[in-house]
Amino acid sequence: EAEVAQSPRYKITEKSQAVAFWCDPISGHATLYWYRQILGQGPELLVQFQDESVVDDSQLPKDRFSAERLKGVDSTLKIQPAELGDSAMYLCASSFDRDSLRCNFGPGTRLTVT
Amino acid sequence: QKEVEQDPGPLSVPEGAIVSLNCTYSNSAFQYFMWYRQYSRKGPELLMYTYSSGNKEDGRFTAQVDKSSKYISLFIRDSQPSDSATYLCAMRGDKIIFGKGTRLHILP
């Protein structure tokens, strides 16, 4: 069965450094999501793409976070500069379209900022 | 008041017991209701979804929605140690909102 791929799986970085995460959604999925999950909490949406366009980035801290999906396939989420409070699991998910309830999550990238 | 409330647990039950997991919500605009299972260090996986009040069954799992009370439940029958995980409820209006998740331990 097709899966959402993410890399790296783990990342340790010092505060004020830049960090980037990569996601490759399931082939044919037009909608891509980036979520942040703090330990003991549910995932919170950071940004949603429909093809290459951002449809919701209302919860993305735009002073330090950026996301792109240039060709409407894979996506990169960047943090610069990283802060201690950014330590969390960053989950990528994809669905066939924005109305689909069946959302497939990747394994996540666990970020630790020291 | 948060839009979605879910008791974080942990909830420990003996193998074979019936498990009941619950969420309450405040936003009447939510139309679709989902349950995800998340194993440690993994991403969530969709278990079930429903969009109407009533019950939906899938094997050992039953999802129940009561829109009048803004209350949803997930029941697991004949629980197994492999069911030990965090269970997240999620609800969709114009976007998907997740609960905090309930950590479930099934004791052999």
Image (cartoon, grey):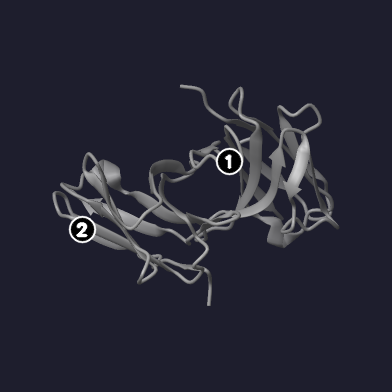
Give the secondary structure at mark 2: strand
Identify the residue under disc 2: B13
**CB of mark 2 within 8 Å of CB of mark 1?**
no
Have a look at marks 2 and 1 and say if they share a chain: no
Residue plotted at (70% across, 38% down): A50
Q: Considering depth in this image, is A110 or B24 the residue closer to the camera?
A: B24
Residue plotted at (58% across, 26% down): A26
Residue plotted at (44% across, 46% down): B40
Q: Relative to A31, does residue A83 appear above or below in the rendering? A: below
Residue plotted at (25% across, 60% down): B20
Q: Considering depth in this image, is B84 or B72 the residue closer to the camera?
A: B72
Amino acid under disc 1:
Gly
Identify the residue under disc 1: A108
A55 displayed left or right of A109:
right
Rounded to the nearest angstrom, the CA distance separating label 2 from label 1 is: 29 Å
Crowdedness of circle 1 by 10 Å Cα count: few (<14), some, many (20+)?
many
